[in-house]
Amino acid sequence: MTEIVERTTSGAIIYDRSVISRISEDQFAPEGWLHREPVSGTLGSTGRGSTLYVGNVPRQFVLRHYVRGGLVGKLNHDAYLWTGEDNTRPFREWRLLAKLVENGLRVPRPAAARYTRHGLVYTADLITVRIPRVRSLSVHIAEQALDESAWHAIGHAIRQFHSQGVFHADMNAHNLQIDEQGKVWLIDLDRGRLLPPGTWQQKTLARLHRSLQKICRLDPGVNFSGRNWEQLLEGYFSASRSA
């Protein structure tokens, strides 16, 4: 991927011309696209109101406006403290995704990102290539039971990310996506980074487990059990032994 940075009147845009040939600030607003549709959330997912599918088939994009969550988000919707261009969330996520794509990992291909500075703070947006025909793990288990091989594949995929040092700040059942071939993708790597092996790997797994348990509390009919979690761990640790 070739990184190009263009200055704007109040910030900058980073993009890859091989993915999106021309980019303007208009394309970081929903009104800049003729076709747009919201990405809906389910079973406790958050932040989806700030994300849209834009563009037309065969190549569609995902446009995401960075928003804050939790208690902070109620007071400060989308502003982040300015500490330099290279530290902005969109530039860091764009560059992380670009590196992971080059390393052969299944993450969204970054198209463009932008920050707009407002004095001591900035707002931000990211455009990625839409992954075709994927559904989140949370949707899958809400609709049907996954077999043992599927849970093994999920664990194996997580281990592939961990073996390359990929830390995901919010590993949950919504950010794990499964395509029609059963391949596992990882999305929403805001605040993600590359780290040496450590306890963060176990903490990531624990966070995913809590996410699955929360979904079960929201809908007791969800197809997830303690045995399924054991199968996921079997896939994870079998990948560790073969690495």
Image (cartoon, grey):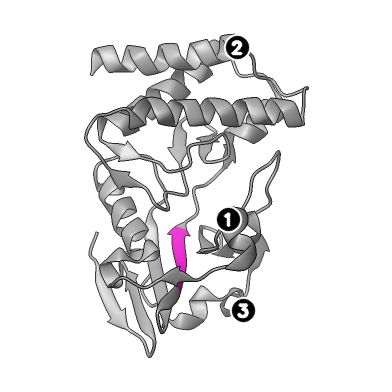
- Dot 1 or dot 3: first in sequence order is 3
In the rendered structure, find residue 69 and report the number of the disc placed on it: 1
Looking at the rendering, the stretch of residues picked out in magenta corresponds to: 123-128
The dominant secondary structure in magenta is strand
For image coordinates 62% across by 75% down, the residue present is: 34
- Dot 2 or dot 3: first in sequence order is 3
Whether residue 208 is situated above or below residue 34 in the rendered picture: above
Instruction: Using the rendered image of the protein, determine whether residue 143 is visible from the camera's viewpoint.
Output: no
Cβ atoms at labels 1 and 2 below 8 Å apart: no
Is the residue marked by circle 2 packed among few (<14), some (14-19), or many (20+) residues within 10 Å?
A: few
**Could you tell me residue 87's position as x and y percent?**
30, 64
- Dot 1 or dot 2: first in sequence order is 1
Task: Decide which of 173, 182 is in the foreground and name it.
Answer: 173
SS for callout 3 = helix
Of circles 1 and 3, the one toward us is: 1
Left or right placement of residue 152 versus residue 141 in this view: left
Dot 2 amino acid type? Gly
SS for callout 2 = helix
Instruction: Using the rendered image of the protein, determine whether residue 199 is visible from the camera's viewpoint.
Output: yes
> Distance from label 1 to label 2 (Cα)?
29 Å
Q: In the rendered image, which quarter is residue 12 located in?
A: bottom left
For image coordinates 64% across by 14% down, the residue present is: 225
**Could you tell me residue 23's position as x and y percent?**
40, 77
> Distance from label 2 to label 3 (Cα)?
45 Å
For image coordinates 43% across by 81% down, the residue present is: 24
Dot 3 amino acid type? Glu
Q: Which residue is mark 3?
A: 31
Task: Decide which of 156, 206 is in the foreground and name it.
Answer: 206
**Could you tell me residue 199's position as x and y percent?**
32, 27
